[in-house]
Image: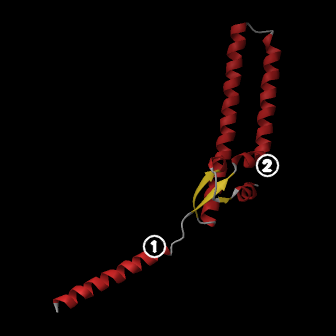
Amino acid sequence: MKSQKQWLVLLIAMILSIGLLAGCAGEKPSTIGIVDMQKVMTENAKIKEMQEQLNKKAQEITAQLEKERTALKPEEFQQKEQLAYAEFMKLKQEYESKIQLQIQKILEEIAKEKKLGAVIYKNGMAWGGVDITDDVLKKLQ
């Protein structure tokens, strides 16, 4: 009788173990998405436009400083130059933050849609993953 109970307990334990292992084996491993940020930054029209605006602003600042160079003392010119550089860097950071937030939101959307466990940048990936760069470019339009 005691032997039968032991066998019954052992049998139940084995069935539960097999059930747990079968459940784990049926799960799909999480997929990793890959995004080529260099391609996103060079091929998106909005980002190109922001880059052009930054370049135009830099040219305007440079031209204005060149006009004022002869009229100002070297110390005054240097101070004016530093202020102009700080203004330009602030504008650049604003643009970069705006772009980064948009891309982050899009990456999260695509990750949910495609059921990705993670998204990494392409330059750090040697092999594997699902390239979602074109999806990001489409949604960024």
Q: Mark 1 touching mark 2, by CB under 8 A?
A: no
Quote the CA–CA distance across marks 1 and 2.
Answer: 42 Å
Residue 66: percent from the left, percent from the top?
A: 81, 17
Secondary structure found at label 2: helix
Name the outermost residue toward the left: 2
Which color scheme did the rendering employ for the protein? secondary structure
Q: On the rendered image, what quadrant is the N terminus found in? A: bottom left
Q: As displayed, is residue 62 above or below residue 45?
A: above
The numbered disc on residue 43 is 2
22 relative position to 60: left or right: left
Secondary structure found at label 1: helix
Q: As displayed, is residue 138 above or below residue 97?
A: below
Q: Name the residue under label 1.
A: 24
Tag 2 or tag 1, which sits nearer the N-term? 1
Which amino acid type is marked by label 1?
Cys
| Quarter of the rendering containing residue 59 | top right
| Quarter of the rendering containing residue 68 | top right
Name the outermost residue toward the top: 73
Return the residue nearer the eye: 92 or 118. 118
Name the outermost residue toward the front: 3
Q: As displayed, is residue 70 above or below residue 42?
A: above
Return the residue nearer the eye: 33 or 101. 33
- Label 1: few (<14), some (14–19) or many (≥20) C-alpha neighbours in 10 Å: few
Residue 12: percent from the left, percent from the top?
A: 31, 84
Which residue is found at the position 69% from the left and 24% from the top? 85
Mark 1 or 2, which is nearer the eye?
1
Q: How many marks?
A: 2
Which amino acid type is marked by label 2?
Glu
Q: On the rendered image, what quadrant is the C terminus found in? A: bottom right
The numbered disc on residue 133 is none
Residue 117: percent from the left, percent from the top?
A: 55, 61
Which residue is found at the position 66% from the left and 26% from the top? 86
